[in-house]
Image (tube, rainbow, N blue to C red):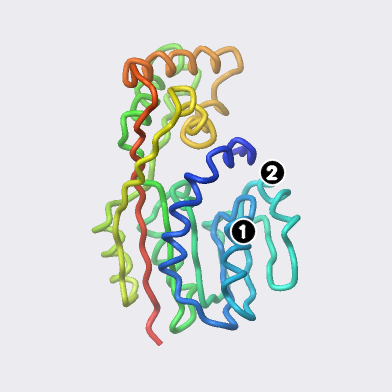
Amino acid sequence: MSWNPDLYLKFQKERFAPFQDLMDLIIVRKGLRALDLGCGTGELTQMVSEVLPQSEVLGIDSSEEMLEKAALKKRPGLNFELCPIEKASGEWDLIFSNAAIQWVGNHDQLIPGLVSLLKPGGQIAVQLPANHTHRTQTIIAELAREESYSSALGGWQRDWSVLSIKEYAGLLYESGAQDINVFEKIYPHVLEDVEAVIDWLSGTALLPYFERLPQELREDFLNSYRERLRDLYPQAPVFYPYQRIFFSARRPE
């Protein structure tokens, strides 16, 4: 997908809040080789590198647009590469990811694969959105099933690969990990109005639909979505609870 870094960072405060909770899960040690999966524009990768003394931190992402901004933050011990998450390789003391692996399929294969990249004693720490069942997102799927959108999309719909916290805990255990910590958290965002909700989702959940729809249908799709959101949220401001999953674990020494 073609990401818009500026649009994604519009809600920087709200998106960075869960990263602080992710940071609390990371065991700080010196001299680590750390890998950030889906580093985006690199701000969070840089923050992690600043709290890991004498460490080598690499951020990977599949978006050239995001990496153009991330490249400005390169320094000794902090680098960025164009690489899809599912192609990650190497041996790492720390693998972390903030709001990225939800875009990758087959988590039942992805998670064991990531654990296998950890050195003995290494840690994985991940935060991913789990708001795909929220009404703001199910409306998108409903619209995509209607004509003429369905024909234009070829019947395509975004199939989210996010699992339950029980399933993530099970995958980590079956991968031989220990010190497993898995939980959900709701972030109670209050957005200005329906347009703010659209701005939020235009940088994430709406993006793959916009890319697949022909230009002449995008505005119509967006207007139809706007009308349904106004029915859902007739008053402003909008209370927008956002659910996220966190998990961390270590590979045995």
Q: Are marks 2 and 1 in contact (CB under 8 Å)?
A: no
Q: Which mark is residue 60?
A: 1
Tell me what residue is drawn at x 60 percent, y 61 percent.
45
| Res. 78 image quadrant | bottom right
Q: Residue at x 63, y 41 (%)?
A: 5
Rate crowding at label 2 as few (under 14), some (14 to 19) or many (20 or more) other CA atoms within 10 Å.
some
The quadrant holding residue 239 is: top left
Q: Where residue 70 appears, x then y in whole percent? A: 69, 54
Q: Residues within 10 Å of mark 1 (few under 14, many from 20)?
A: many
User: In this rendering, is residue 6 above or below 110?
Assistant: above
> Residue 72 got which mark?
none
The quarter of the picture where the C terminus appears is bottom left
Which one is in front, 202 or 154?
Answer: 202
Q: Nearer the viewer, residue 191 or 44?
A: 191
| 63 vs 46, nearest the viewer | 46
Please, is residue 6 above or below residue 119 in the view? above
Amino acid identity at mark 2: Glu
Asked which secondary structure carries label 2, the reply is helix
- Position of residue 118 measured from the top left corner of the image (x, y, whole percent): 48, 75
Q: Position of residue 170 (x, y in %)?
A: 26, 64
Q: Residue at x 33, y 39 (%)?
A: 241
Compared to residue 52, the image places residue 126 above or below, namely above
Mark on residue 65?
2
Give how far apart the Cα atoms at labels 2 and 1 are. 13 Å
